Image (cartoon, helix red, strand yellow):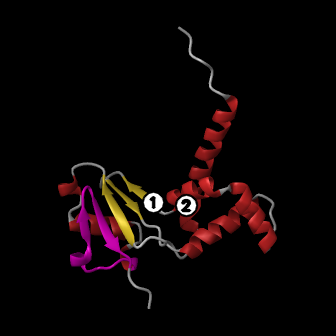
Amino acid sequence: MTTASPDPIALQATLVDFALAELVRQNRSSFQPLWSTESWAKLLIWLALNCGCSGDETGLKTFAEALGSVQTGRMRRVFFERELPDLELQVMADPAEQQVLVLAQGPADELLEPERVARALERIELAERVVADRSRWQRLDGLLAIPWQEVQ
């Protein structure tokens, strides 16, 4: 029995998707302030400039159109998520959303213990941006939803 060769176009698409995700992971902490739409915009501008686009409005729009909404969405998810394998937690903290989500990668009762989650938030420099009052943290099935601090 023989298996079909992978489609070269599909392989290229997979490689580009992988490379972009790794590029975002490797550089996301370079753009301050962390966990902000401003840092996301700075990453996109940096990418556009490194792809030869001008930094003016037309150049940035051209880049955004070429990237497309699907790829931009994937990159944004990677930009605003963190995996903490030693704590068995995944944090998704897109400031466009109302809450930060902390997902357990194992038994939720043990892994979503407030002290453990607080350590994770400190480690990824997110603790100062979310509500510290743990009574406002909402436990859902397999995850913890934590509101962002209100901007003064």
Residue 104 falls left or right of residue 20:
left
Quarter of image, res 136: bottom left
Q: Quarter holding the C terminus?
A: bottom left
Q: Which mark is residue 76?
A: 2
**Tag 2: Cα neighbours inside 10 Å, few (<14), some, or many (≥20)?**
some
Residue at image mark 1: 81
Note whether 152 is above or below 119 in the view shown: below
Residue at 75%, 67% in the rendered image? 61
Of 99 and 54, nearer the camera is 99
State whether residue 69 is above or below residue 14. Answer: below
The residue sitting at 56% across, 58% down in the picture is 73
Hey, what amino acid is under mark 1? Answer: Glu
Q: Look at the image and give the residue range highlighted in magenta.
A: 129-148
Residue 26, visible in the rendered structure:
no
Which badge, 1 or 2, comes first in the chain's sequence? 2
Residue 103 found in image quarter: bottom left
Residue 8 appears in which quarter of the rendering? top right
